[in-house]
Image (tube, grey):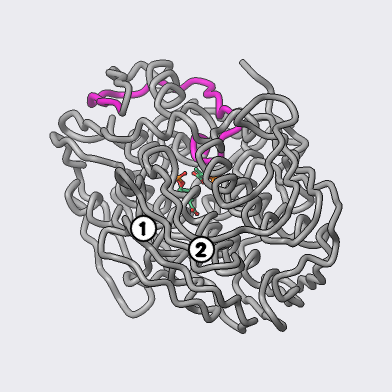
């Protein structure tokens, strides 16, 4: 079993000397709480990069403080951008489309968002030489389709170890704009990375998608963030054709949304324990696709109440299964659903998520292996899995250096005794405070060093 890549844990990481966490079962219906969720990773890293590129000053409040956002800020600083952080507010002096430093080494940790958003933003520079190193896992995750698209637009990308993967060097000499086609089947982030940079190309950029986009909502988040910073992209309904005008961003002051993906674990906590959890700071009109887990929880028998800026989930006596669901549009939640599926009254099949084999771990394989260790019957497919109802037996579970594996599996510990999760600190990628928040809901969380 591979060791966690501790280099990717940032100064904002938590639990750095903790080897294991034990989650103890709670009594049915004993959870009755409300919780405030940290900022969205996706929104934070888009806003940070755009603010870095923009003309003028930006002030972003409610940022996520996690490894992914730390390495994003760190990269901006290495590029000569002044970033002041105070609590969860950042003030950024944008560079107006010309990075002050033209030659630097950047480390981006395990963040897919930086790995896919930054190269285009660097390539817009009229000259420059940027060396980018990523974590071990991020260096195994695909980036070639994005780099090929950038090369079509005039970028010069040099792979330093393995063709198509990090580490790499961006030799910047501007982007031409014009037309580019890119597949959305492997990652929506490639498309976001092209769009974000496109407004600094010489000519308007038309991006076309020849197939479909996994998790197309994340592209919409990019389009909306670009618009908020003054760049209005025109696009068709299914986002298969998008036209980015030559313009450039203008600095903004804005509050950022809470993370709907993080919120989903706490909704799942209510679902699986029969408890009630209110998320204090989540709007239903967000573009974050994981908000649609509320519909999945409803389908499983939960009562979901939607208020003005809050959402409450109340779990049933018995979770309902017996359905098949495409997780293509909210793939990060496949693991959450897989973790609570054993407690449903009939099997649950999740499909159309082959791309999550290329996330922080091979997530389909990881969750199938760990559920089987718990004695749960699963069927693994190339693009998903089927989980049968069962009573897990407590055991020690591996977290694969994958925040979502750790957060999802912790839910099982709230139901059965003896669930121990290795390397809980991996949650720092997107939610360093996850176990602290879980403890606040009333769950017994015990760490060992
Ligand atoms: O653009 C984004 O912020 C994200 C896009 C999605 O990635 P893929 O489209 O690569 O699956 C999602 O899984 C990730 O957590 C965040
Ligand atoms: C896939 C994920 O992250 P990344 O932004 O690194 O792709 C995730 O957070 O589940």
Numbered label attached to residue 24: none
Q: Is residue 396 visible?
A: yes
Mark 1 C-beta closer than 8 Å to ligand 1: no
Give residue 364's position: percent from left, percent from top: 40, 27
Q: Is residue 405 magenta?
A: yes
Q: Is residue 38 visible?
A: no
Q: SS class of the residue under badge 2?
A: loop
Apparent side of residue 363 relative to residue 68 in the rendered image (left or right) = left
The relative height of residue 20 versus residue 306 in the rendered view (above or below) is above
Question: On the image, numbered disc 1 is attached to which residue?
Answer: 217
Quarter where residue 353 is shown: top left
Question: On the image, numbered disc 2 is attached to which residue?
Answer: 37
Highlighted range, magenta:
384-406
Question: Badge 1 local density, few (<14 within 10 Å), some, or many (20+)?
Answer: some
Gap in angstroms between the C-alphas marked 2 and 1:
20 Å
Question: Badge 2 local density, few (<14 within 10 Å), some, or many (20+)?
Answer: many
**In the rendered structure, which disc, 2 or 1, sits on the residue that comes first in sequence?**
2
* Residue under the point 71% across and 46% down: 108
The relative height of residue 402 versus residue 391 in the rendered view (above or below) is below
Give residue 241's position: percent from left, percent from top: 34, 59
């Amino acid at each position: 079993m591979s060791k966690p890549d501790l280099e990717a844990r940032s100064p904002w990481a938590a639990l750095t000397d903790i080897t294991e966490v034990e989650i103890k079962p709670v009594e049915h219906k004993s959870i009755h709480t409300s919780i405030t969720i940290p900022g969205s990773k996706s929104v934070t890293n888009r806003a940070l990069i755009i603010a870095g590129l923009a003309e003028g000053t930006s002030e972003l409040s409610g940022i996520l403080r996690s490894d992914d956002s730390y390495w994003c800020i760190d990269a901006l600083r290495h590029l000569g951008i002044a970033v002041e952080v105070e609590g969860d507010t950042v003030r950024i002096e944008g560079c107006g489309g010309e990075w002050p430093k033209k030659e630097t080494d950047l480390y981006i940790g395990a963040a897919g968002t930086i790995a896919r958003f930054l190269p285009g933003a660097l390539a817009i520079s009229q000259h420059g030489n940027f060396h980018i190193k990523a974590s071990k896992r991020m260096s195994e995750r695909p980036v070639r389709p994005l780099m090929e698209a950038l090369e079509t637009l005039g970028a010069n990308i040099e792979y330093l170890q393995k063709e198509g993967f990090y580490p790499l060097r961006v030799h910047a000499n501007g982007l031409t704009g014009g037309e580019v086609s890119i597949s959305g089947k492997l990652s929506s982030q490639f498309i976001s990375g092209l769009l974000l940079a496109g407004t600094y190309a010489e000519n308007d950029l038309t991006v076309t998608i020849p197939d479909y986009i996994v998790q197309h909502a994340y592209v919409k988040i990019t389009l909306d963030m670009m618009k908020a910073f003054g760049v209005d992209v025109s696009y068709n309904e299914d986002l298969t054709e998008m036209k980015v005008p030559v313009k450039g961003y203008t600095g903004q002051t804005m509050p950022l949304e809470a993370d709907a993906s993080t919120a989903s674990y706490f909704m799942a906590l209510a679902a699986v324990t029969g408890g009630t959890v209110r998320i204090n700071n989540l709007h239903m009109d967000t573009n974050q696709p994981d908000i649609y887990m509320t519909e999945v929880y409803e389908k499983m028998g939960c009562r979901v109440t939607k208020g003005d800026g809050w959402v409450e989930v109340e779990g049933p006596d018995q979770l309902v299964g017996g359905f098949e669901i495409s997780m293509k549009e909210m793939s990060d939640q496949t693991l959450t659903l897989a973790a609570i599926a054993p407690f449903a009254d009939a099997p649950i099949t999740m499909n159309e998520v082959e791309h999550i084999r290329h996330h922080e771990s091979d997530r389909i394989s990881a969750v199938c292996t760990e559920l089987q260790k718990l004695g749960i019957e699963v069927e693994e497919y190339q693009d998903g899995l089927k989980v049968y109802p069962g009573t897990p037996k407590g055991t020690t579970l591996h977290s694969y250096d994958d925040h979502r594996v750790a957060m999802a599996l912790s839910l099982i510990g709230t139901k059965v005794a003896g669930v121990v999760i290795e390397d809980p600190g991996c949650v720092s990628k997107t939610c360093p405070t996850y176990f602290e928040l879980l403890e606040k809901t009333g769950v017994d969380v015990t760490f060992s060093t």
